[in-house]
Structure formats: structure tokens, C-alpha cells
Amino acid sequence: DERRRPPAVVLTLLYRAYCHLCDEMLDALRPLVRIHAASIEVVDVDRPEHAALEREWGERVPVLFRGAPVATNELCHYRLDAPRVEAALAVASQPELASPGKIR
């Protein structure tokens, strides 16, 4: 029943096309996203429309967030912290525990 299903969690990955760490994080993240019925929004920080994100996060890319790319939503950077991501996804699947505004 759609009404009982919790809202889908969006993980935002700040990414660079030429970055092997970015590719590794995205590859490691895909199975977790499938298991938890979440989705990934990949944002290439080198595109002109993301210049502000590149200025703020450029040296830490890849960076993964639960929801919007803001410091309070950061889950990990450089390498996937699978236990932390799993915990964030597990909490998000329980609407009574999920923090409003952190899931989009």
C-alpha cells in the first residue's frame, strides 16, 4: 500500500567525472540503495551550474549526503562509510525516527 510506504530517501553524491574515488563510492553505494529502496542523485561539481558546490566541497569530493548537500547531512567523503550509510537509510525507513527536512 503506497500510503504505508515511507518516503524514498535520496542520497546526493558530489562527483567528478575523472575521479576514481568517485567511481568507487558510486559502485559501492549502488547495492545499498537497492536494498533500502533509496535513490542516488549524482551531482558533477565541475559543471558550471554547480560552481558553488565545487567551491564549498571541491577538496572533499566525493562527498555523500542524505538529502541536500549541506554539512549537517554529510554521511562520508572520499570512501564509502557503509555502516553509517546503512544506519542513515535504516532510520529513514522508519518515519517516526526520520528527521523532517533531511529527506527529500
Image (cartoon, rainbow, N blue to C red):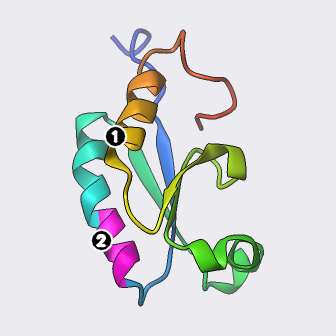
Main secondary structure of the magenta stretch: helix
In the image, residue 63 above or below residue 88: below
Residue type for callout 1: Pro
Give percent across and percent down for residue 31: 22, 49
x%, y% of residue 76?
Answer: 49, 55
Q: Does the magenta stretch include residue 38?
A: no
- Does 34 appear above or below 17? above
Which residue position is annotated with label 2? 24
Would residue 38 be visible to someone looking at this image?
no
Direction bottom: furthest residue: 18
In which quarter of the view is residue 67 placed? top right
Range of residues picked out in magenta: 20-26
Label 2 Cα crowd, 10 Å radius (few <14 / some 14-19 / many 20+): some
Residue behind mark 1: 83
Residue 85 vs 77, above or below: the answer is above
Q: Dot 1: what SS?
A: helix
Q: Give the residue drawn at x 34%, y 83%.
A: 20
Q: What distance separates the C-alpha of mark 1 from that of mark 2?
A: 16 Å
Q: For this view, does 1 lie left or right of residue 54? A: left
Image quarter where the N terminus lies is top left
Question: Nearer the viewer's eye, disc 1 or disc 2?
Answer: 1
